[in-house]
Amino acid sequence: MNIEEQWKDMGEQQDKDLASLLKMPGIANLASKDPLQKIKNNLLIHCVWAVIISGLYIFILVRFPFWQLMLSIGIVLLFTVLAIIKSLQLYQKLSVNNPALTVLQQMEHHYYTIQKWISIQQWVGLFIYPVSAAGGFMLGGFIGSGKPIEVFMQKPAMIITLLISIAVLVPACFYLAKWMSRKAFGQYAEALKQNIDSLKKEN
């Protein structure tokens, strides 16, 4: 049975998440032989962790209701919630089997949708990491000094330390997030691309 026949059979099984679509040579070394299914599973795990982290942000805002934290952590919380929504939307899109498209067209659509989502997540992070670093720095400063944020942040040394922290943490967080994204999604997107290329050769 070739890939296209597998795909059509999947449409008759009440959305079993394309579990047997992409069983091709070249990706046997992966934990799952269905890269699309692996991406969907990791999306759900991603959402669960994002919900847990959002709960932590809410706890911080309730426990330390300072306007500086309400602003910085609140922005990070907002973008985290939006990321959860976008991730669930992507999950739903990957679950759709559009009969109006060929197997190859659907695979290509899924691949480029995944790649676009990964890219957006990474670049949005560049705007969020400085805000998150500033919020974390101010929270740590308050807990460590016991002084109001506006008091200890008046010191020039604290401003310089904050700027250095942001300069170090932003690129570090960006490359860490990029590495984690590749482990969770990128390698399976590449496997999906290999299957697309193989299907094109068959045609």
Image (cartoon, rainbow, N blue to C red):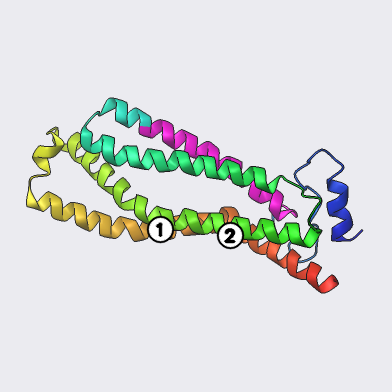
In this view, the residue in front, 83 or 180, is 83
Sequence-wise, which precedes: disc 2 or disc 1? 2
Snapshot quadrant of residue 13: top right
Measure the C-alpha gap from mark 2 to mark 1: 17 Å
Quarter of the image with the C terminus is bottom right
Mark 2: give few (<14), some (14-19) or many (20+) Cα within 10 Å.
Answer: some
Depth check, mark 2 against mark 1: the one in front is 2
x then y, percent, for residue 27 = 73, 62
79 up-or-down from 65: above or below: below
* Left or right, residue 197 beside residue 89: right
* Left or right, residue 88 beside residue 159: right
Name the residue located 22 percent from the left edge and 38 percent from the top edge: 68
- According to the picture, the residue beneath numbered tag 1 turns out to be 174
180 up-or-down from 16: above or below: below
- According to the picture, the residue beneath numbered tag 2 turns out to be 115
Quick one: SS at disc 2? Answer: helix
x then y, percent, for residue 147 = 12, 34
Magenta part of the chain: 32-57
Is 44 one of the magenta-colored residues?
Answer: yes
Q: Main secondary structure of the magenta part?
A: helix
Snapshot quadrant of residue 1: bottom right
- Most extreme residue toward the front is 100
